[in-house]
Image: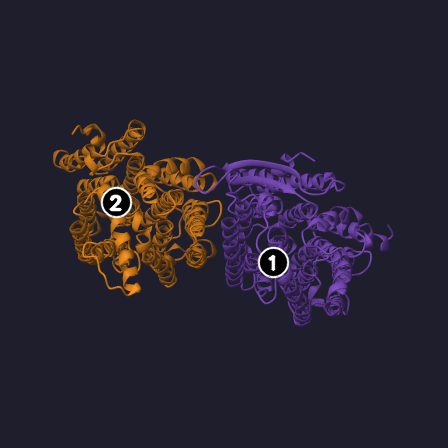
Chain colours: A orange, B purple
Amino acid sequence: MDLEYQLIIPEFVMAGLAVLVIAAALAFRNVDQKWFGYATAAALAVIAVVTAVAYWNTNDDFGGVLAVDHFTVLFRVFFLGIAFFTVMAAVQFAGDRLKNHAEFYGLIVFATLGMMLLAASRELLTAYLSLELLSFSFYILVGFNKLNPFSNEGSLKYMLLGAFSSALMLYGISLIYGVTGTTTYSAIGPDVVEGTRNIAGQLASFAGGSGGVDPDGARPGLLIGLVLITAGLGFKVSAVPFHQWTPDAYQGAPLPITAFLSAGGKAAAFAFFLRLFSEAFLPAAAEWVWFVGILAAVTMIVGNLMALQQTNFKRLMAYSSISQVGYLLVGIVALDAANITQSQDAASALVLHLIGYVTTNIAVFAAIIAFYNRTGRDDIVDLRGLAERQPFLAFAIAAALFSLAGMPLFAGFATKFIIFQAAFNNGFLWLGAIGVTASFVSLYYYLMVIKQMYLYEPEGSDRARFHVSRPLAGALVVLVAGVLFIGLYPTPLFDVIHSSTEGLFEQAAALSAAVVGG
Amino acid sequence: MDAGEALLLLLLIPGAAMLLTILVPSRHADVVRWIALVATTATLIDSIWIFAVYDFAEGGYQFNLQYPWIENIAFLGENGISLHLAVDGIAAPMVLLNGLVGFAGVLVSWKITHRVKDFFILFMALFTGVYGVYIGQDLFFWFFAYELAVLPMYLLIVIWGSTNKEYGAMKLTMVLVGGSVLIFIGIFAVFAEAGAGTFDMAVLREIEFGRGFANTFFPFFMIGCGILAGLFPFHTWSPDGHVAAPTAVSMLHAGVLMKLGAFGIIRLGMEILPAGTDFWMPVLLVLGGVAAVYGAISAIHQTDLKFVIGYSSVSHMGFVLMGLGTMNNIGVNGAVLQMFSHGVMTALFFAMVGGLYDQAHTRDIRVFGGLVRKMPLFVIFFGIAGLTSLGLPGLSGFVAEFHIFVGTIDTFPLFAALGILSAALTAIYVLRLMGRAALGPFNPRWENLKDLTRWEIAAAIVLIAPIIAMGIWPDPFIDRIAPTVAELPKIDQIGGLFTLSSLTGR
């Protein structure tokens, strides 16, 4: 087999970069630690640009294990971007409050590598390993502030539940392998068609009372495996009821890691989710769509209702991100086995919302990091009078929160509009209606934060105006501009996304043609 | 008429003013004010031009302008989402109204000194959003503008408001956005049902939606938009919001924003889902009638000037909804006239109350008396607004309400009686207010009051001119509104188009 190894050079470079950053700390002991951060950020930016330019029109599937297609490249660049902004936002924070900076940045690079591989995986074990690389990096990063008991608690909870969810997922994978005899998406797909047809046939024969059970036919193992994998993924993306670790991990983690976790971790899990469900499980959509639908609805409702009572900003953002997962799951529900065009629309809508959400969330966290650098506080009431002390930060936070609530001018409005419309077009009126109502509820708690910043005068001993460090301010400007741009003119981004999701459904299209034909 | 760029300017000028204001350092408050004044002057001129040039002999939608925004991708077909602007005979007076009230709003905001820059940025966002709703012809952008008009209210009230402002602002925002949730769902449903792959209203209007579908989703638009128009029983946000809001925001809010609701019922409900009107419009008429009486009775009981006007707005918007509910040409005509008339009148009311409150720091009617001795101009202007409100012939309120009552008598005589009763109730609270605060024995506590500032006088004149113009010569308005109304689907034709014009000396 002639494999084009040059296509996964970015992944190799990332692995090398991670090791290099960590090793460099041993060699350059007297260098100001912040340069490790800026060097990492610069390297990430270069890799992102090169990947975007050089790899867009490449395609290879590495024997069904990894795919380097538009989807992979889009997500590579996306993850590199997330890592870049996280590092930019983290430099001052790490300098003030963390030790072992090089390891910190190295682990971020490792986590990013895991994300990139995850988006490219087309084989269950490869995906699992990538997910573990990502998760292990995060377990350490969440507990990186090792003198802080919250950080330790969050890390421990995250690790225990993460291990549990990995076990669930592995068990699901083993069931799928047992039933289908393969772990590659491309081979599972046709088998799923066969399997579901048999389940349906069996149910029909039960209903008919003939009692004739075809011993080779029904494969409940497939369905159970599917449920287990969904549950495992539910943990990773923190969908209700698998969300319990999220608030603690978010609160305990150092702020830049909270940002990275809420942006990168979610985006990677959704890239995996989307590729798995559209390439391998799409033909069985009728079997899973109802429970993913319920998962989405419950996640939107519970996430938003829990967020209403939070007083800590990080916990608020944790629940807010849970509710955003609900909106993203709507995109999965809108996948339709019988209608490939609709499926691709839904997948594109999901990715668009994902990018909008991630940009917005990093913007919020970058602004909060800047605030935290100055004050060391992260309760919602601590934001009082921020509009007087630092109007730009207050504006950035307000804009980003309005975007999360789905208000016009900002990314959230356009992307939610498109993702909910995808659900409506697939007949999920109730789910879209819950989504719209849930995002209306979310406006309340976002407004409570905005009120603190704009309504009240600054309190406490430190009321002076303050400056934000230049690199962080620059990153923040770019992020807020991105939020506005996606909100006002998502067309170019949507075009790119739409062309990148095309590859996900080639197989399903061929299969459904075959089914219709046969 | 093909000069759609004039419509685009309505969005670009305040948008550019907003950006420009962001760039001005906040210590140059006067520069910020002048930018706002120049921008609103320009939009006012543009609005007048659009109103004047709208070709009523031709009718229909004019000034069409369409730029594709996202098309031929995913579920979107040709012109899937486009920036499509146009005005018809109903939108033209509304555009003029927004121009007038926005301009006057800047004038009375001249004396704001706290965070001037932020104020005008948000003011311009609100102003742009309102224009966007009146001229938008694409559901995506229509809804975009609708939310944009509602959203800045929260910050405007919370930062610059008074009297229980946190409560009022949150209540207003949550109730209004709650209404827009319904609209949002309705828009999605209409798009999915139409299957045309476009949010362009011009296309959706041509599609005949089934009766069952229309009956199900008409109330999403009727209630969703109706909430913003003070539809009973969802009106309670309105007085609280009015009282809490700063003067200029109350003006825009009662003067223009509430009209967006009634306008939305016409645009989304009556035009896109006409099959639902048979069942739902009588409901709207009943609710409007209840609001008219209930608002008037509530206003009688209030002691805070702004609460009086707030409830009077609910009452007057009840007339608008009644007029729409008649579904005949005269009633709907009257509703649109009332939207304009009430818009300028109530803006004048709030401008005057603001002028008083800024000096007296109270709005309690009971403590005032004999203000005419100190503030003669205030009393004159306030009196004109009051007389318009109670429907004095020769002023705009009479023309509008007369149409509504004529329309209602034809279909629901009982409710016409109810409406006339509430007009009588209006006379009670307006005259009581005038008698108590403006005339009556002078309260020496107010020895130091000064009359209105020149900015306020200018604002008042800008608002009074159309009140009188429409009162004595309503033809320019009716000429534009009536043919458009007559072309709405499912409108009963009772009598000739210009029934009232003949009465008012045409």
Q: Chain of mark 2?
A: A
* Dot label at residue B276: 1
The amino acid on which the numbered mark 1 sits, given as a three-letter code, is: Gly
Nearest the viewer among B324 and A209 is A209
- Up-down: is B2 above or below B395? above
Q: Position of residue A265 (x, y in %)?
A: 27, 47
Q: Residue at x 43, y 41 (%)?
A: B74
Residue B428 visible (yes or no): no
Q: Are marks 1 and 2 on the same chain?
A: no
Q: Position of residue B322 (x, y in %)?
A: 69, 62
Q: Is residue A491 left or right of residue A514?
A: right
**Is residue B130 visible in the rendered structure shown here?**
yes
Disc 1 and disc 2 in contact, CB within 8 angstroms: no
Residue A250, image quadrant: bottom left
A208 relative to B377 in the view: left or right: left
Q: Secondary structure at mark 1?
A: helix
Separation (CA) of disc 1 from disc 2:
47 Å
Nearer mark to the viewer, of 1 and 2: 2
